[in-house]
Amino acid sequence: MGSLTFLVAVACTLTTVQSASVSKRETLTIATDKYHNYNDLQALLRQLVSNYPNLARVYDVGTSMGGRKLSVIQISDRVNEREVGEPRFKYIGNIHGNEAVGREVILYLAQYLLYNYGTDPRVTQLVDTTDIHLMPTLNPDGFEISREGECDNVVGRTNNNGVDLNRNFPDQYWMTGTIQAETQAVMDWIKTQPNFVLSASLQCVTLVAAYPFDDHQYGDISSGLYAATPDDATFKALAKSYANAHPTMHFGRGCGGNDNFKDGIINGAEWLTVAGGMQDYNYLNSNTFEITIEISCCRYPNSSELASYWNDNRNALLTYIEQTHMGVKGVVKTSDGTPIANAQVRVSGIDYTMNTSDLGEYWRLLIPGTYSISFSVEGYTTASTSVTVSSGSPVVLNVTFDTSTKQGSITQG
Ligand SMILES: *[C@@H]1O[C@H](CO)[C@@H](O)[C@H](O)[C@H]1NC(C)=O
Ligand SMILES: *[C@@H]1O[C@H](CO)[C@@H](O)[C@H](O)[C@H]1NC(C)=O
Ligand SMILES: *[C@@H]1O[C@H](CO)[C@@H](O)[C@H](O)[C@H]1NC(C)=O
């Protein structure tokens, strides 16, 4: 019960052959029998990179106040190259150090993607088309002092300075205190090129997918007020994609009691106003759409329950990454082939500007519908067109701005 083994088809056919295939099988076991403390986590990430050097890479985005690395495992085909047009995705776990389930399922997800690449078509497709970045813990210090089996205890929630990291990001309305090392690391990370397209923070303690905004100008006393982003319809669809792919989240009952989340999703501010939350900061300061997913009723359940959390979340974790591929995407260039960075991409009726990346790329997440989309570059006439988005793959719209006429032309793929 403590561990789940995923045998790839090849390994199955070789089970009786020889010892080489037996050791291959052992590397494909995702051990869910105990939590990974800081040293175990670091060792596992490095082991994965050494076993899968062409698919995985580890890097650190900073150091916690307590001196621990904020490590990320990046998983993609050709992981050491910058592939033009490939969207970046991230999961962040354990922003509250005592909320341990996200930390573990992210580690299982990393193993699942690597062990099944090349044999499972769904995993292969995801890893081939997406640049996936997984940060199991943003609060390694808090985790080290948290205790297994504690569902409600708050020891370890904050960082070493006693600061709740999900209240520490610069906020659109409120002052949120001295920026901590962990917060600054994320602020720097999300500025890297190209910006992440989609992201989620895995937290506790209920079952719901919450989407921005997390607060409004009326302050804490006004909890219960819906604070819609301009991309409200898209955020709802993103949150639903996770809740629907989870066996119980979409029932909307959370953990029982007074929880009642229609379809298993809720607007952050309407539910529980948070100033300084990470998801709002992502949307307002980069082109990243981030939601917060609460995946467990117990903050730090006994390790004997980890296998069942992984079973409940595996499909939803994959489904949510797949949402990176929707809407409209493309590349903006000049007629001499030079990519245009910081071209502004706007959709009429949605008051949000997206900027192209350093290589002229953009990924405009949108739910199915017909939109008017425009591309603006300083010194050129704005180019616009009508585009119909359906579910499934994104529509490709490439834009070329003619350096002599100053007009743009849009090619649809
Ligand atoms: C975890 O296990 C301990 C010891 O077996 C037990 O006392 C405790 O109630 C368990 N906690 C949960 C949340 O199941
Ligand atoms: C896009 O570029 C504009 C103009 O340079 C800038 O003000 C804005 O903050 C950028 N938006 C994002 C989300 O980075
Ligand atoms: C759009 O541009 C990208 C990058 O240059 C290219 O790979 C793709 O084939 C182009 N698609 C269309 C429809 O022009």
Image: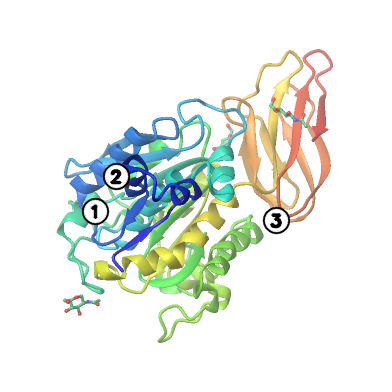
For label 3, the SS is loop
> Which numbered disc covers residue 182?
2
**What's the residue at 66%, 61% (across, down)?**
233
Mark 2 near ligand 2 (CB under 8 Å)? Answer: no
Residue 283 vertical placement versus 341 (above, below): below
- The image shows residue 347 at horizontal and vertical percentages of 73, 46
Q: Gap between marks 1 and 2, in whole Å? A: 20 Å
**Pointer 2: residues within 10 angstroms few (<14), some, or many (20+)?**
many
Which mark sits nearer the N-terminus, 2 or 3?
2
- The image shows residue 185 at horizontal and vertical percentages of 33, 39
**Pointer 1: residues within 10 angstroms few (<14), some, or many (20+)?**
some
Which mark sits nearer the N-terminus, 1 or 3?
1
Q: Gap between marks 2 and 3, in whole Å? A: 33 Å
> Which numbered disc covers residue 367?
3
Q: Gap between marks 1 and 3, in whole Å? A: 38 Å
Left or right: where does residue 236 sit relative to residue 206? Answer: right
**Pointer 3: residues within 10 angstroms few (<14), some, or many (20+)?**
many
The label nearer to you, 1 versus 3, is: 1
**Residue situated in front as seen by the camera: 374 or 369:** 369
**What's the residue at 33%, 52% (across, down)?**
168
Which mark sits nearer the N-terminus, 1 or 2?
1
- The image shows residue 286 at horizontal and vertical percentages of 51, 41
Do tag 2 and tag 3 residues touch (Cβ < 8 Å)?
A: no
**Badge 1 amino acid:** His
- The image shows residue 248 at horizontal and vertical percentages of 50, 75
**Badge 3 amino acid:** Ile
**Badge 2 amino acid:** Glu
Q: Quadrant of ligand 2?
A: top right
Mark 3 near ligand 2 (CB under 8 Å)? Answer: no
Q: Which residue is mark 1?
A: 36
**What's the residue at 62%, 40% (across, down)?**
354
